[in-house]
Amino acid sequence: MHKIHFTGLLLLILTLFFSCTNENSPIGLGLMDQMGTDFTDTITVSAYSYLEDTINTTSLSANMVGHISDPVFGPSVASIYTQMAMSANNVNFGENPVIDSCIFTLQLASYYGDTTSRVGIRVHRLNEAPKNRFNYYQNNSLSYDPTPLNYQLTDYAISPNQEVVVDTAIYSPHVRIRLSQAFGQYLLNHQSELNNNLSSILKGLYITAVSHTGNTGYMILTSMTSTLSGITIYYHNDNGSGLRYKLVCANSSVRFNEYLHDYNQSSDPAFIQEVLHGDRSVGESVLYVQGTGGVKTRITFPYLKEAFQSLGNRVVINKAELVVTDLSPDEPYLTHPTILTLQGIKEGTEAITYLPDDDYYTSTSYFGGTYNVENHEYRFRITEYVQKLISGNGELSNSVNLVVRGSGVRANRLIFGGTNLDDSQRLRLEISYTKY
């Protein structure tokens, strides 16, 4: 008899143990309901989209160049400023070196836009060298020689998934831009300066885009510090032919991106009214974000603390999720970002910082922000942030910025639902909480 009671007690303990440890089990959810868990998605949210002020583009992991036309965001141009470096010291071009050709190459890391387009990429010499230990932003520029170094002023096609064959050798996908013979010979004629002080004859390069074919164009993400990128000088001398030497962009080379956006050419009246004219009421219907230092959205929860004030400190936030819904998921070429992020704002300032839920402290799987293809939405788990706002013991304001993650190397943009649409599309905060 005692044996039967012991066995039954053991089974009960095991059942309770597994019910408590399995967060997704029906039993666990049922117990939570009995404890008084409530749900709301009607917390007031206000939002508006506006122009990004500055993003640091110095020494990014990769750099963008290209020309895009977007009917909503208008045309955008990405340009690169970079120093060049010697691939090997004490170069010796031999007696009477003569240029055969001079090729500038850009290794492809990724792209955004229409690969059937061609883009007019131009390479220029800088008149001033980029400064070491200096932060450059997306709206900075340097003086350059207006005459391009290109051998021909042409538009360039890209094949992001196609290897390139050069003299029977196979290379990763890249763009090859032939530079002028005069420039190549100029480098050969200044062997001494190359060895002693490269910047005295070549302060750096400005790589930009001036036009594109087709309706959209493209931007390419380039691995500037790759051994495949750089200037290759093909030459011969009195003692031989088929010789070559390369100038590269070293890890220590100063480089940065400039991004120019002409939002006045947008064909979207709502975008112009909200982003350019500052009409925040438009945010009730539609909102925008764009990479390359373009557009961000300020989201505020103005009455969040007041909504829970009657409960005092007697409330636990079980889960709080900010839901962002894509309004244009099937746009050709102008694709949505694969991941967004939220920036916290310190109370009483505009200083940017991490939210306590950010994957800097947690993980991407917890924090979220990745695009859900099936639901056309992004979700952010901001439970601890909301709990601190309600309890009043945090240092962050009740506003956050929504931006494209990795904006310095991402050109994607998003058009998403405002705060006053129907439930399936509106920007909303979903909160599950327990009163005690």
Image (spheres, grey):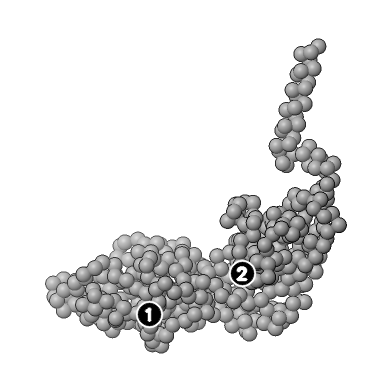
Q: Earlier in the sequence, mark 1 or mark 2?
A: 1
Is the residue 239 above or below the residue 353 in the image? below
Residue closest to the far front: 393
Residue sitting nearer the eye, 370 or 361: 361
Q: Quadrant of residue 253?
A: bottom left
Q: Quadrant of residue 272?
A: bottom right
Query: Which residue is drawn at the image coordinates 80% and 65% (left, top)?
Result: 303
Q: Amino acid at mark 2?
A: Ala
**Contact (Cβ within 8 Å) of mark 1 with mark 2:** no
Residue closest to the far right: 310
Residue 209 seen in this snapshot: no
Residue sitting nearer the eye, 103 or 314: 314
Relative side of 429 to 332, left or right: right
The crowding category of the residue bearing disc 2, from other C-alpha atoms within 10 Å (few below 14, some 14 to 19, many at least 20), is few
Query: Which residue is drawn at the image coordinates 71% and 81% (left, top)?
Result: 278
In the picture, which quadrant includes the N terminus? top right
Query: Which residue is drawn at the image coordinates 32% and 82% (left, top)?
Result: 180
**Residue indicated by mark 2:** 351
Residue 19 seen in this snapshot: yes
Residue sitting nearer the eye, 159 or 434: 434
**Residue indicated by mark 1:** 129
Q: Quadrant of residue 297?
A: bottom right
Q: Amino acid at mark 1?
A: Ala
Callout 2: helix, strand or loop?
loop
The x, y position of residue 100, in whole percent, is: 25, 76
Residue sitting nearer the eye, 200 or 419: 200
The crowding category of the residue bearing disc 1, from other C-alpha atoms within 10 Å (few below 14, some 14 to 19, many at least 20), is many
Query: Which residue is drawn at the image coordinates 36% and 78% (left, top)?
Result: 204
Relative side of 392 to 266, left or right: right
Q: CA distance from mark 1 to mark 2?
A: 31 Å
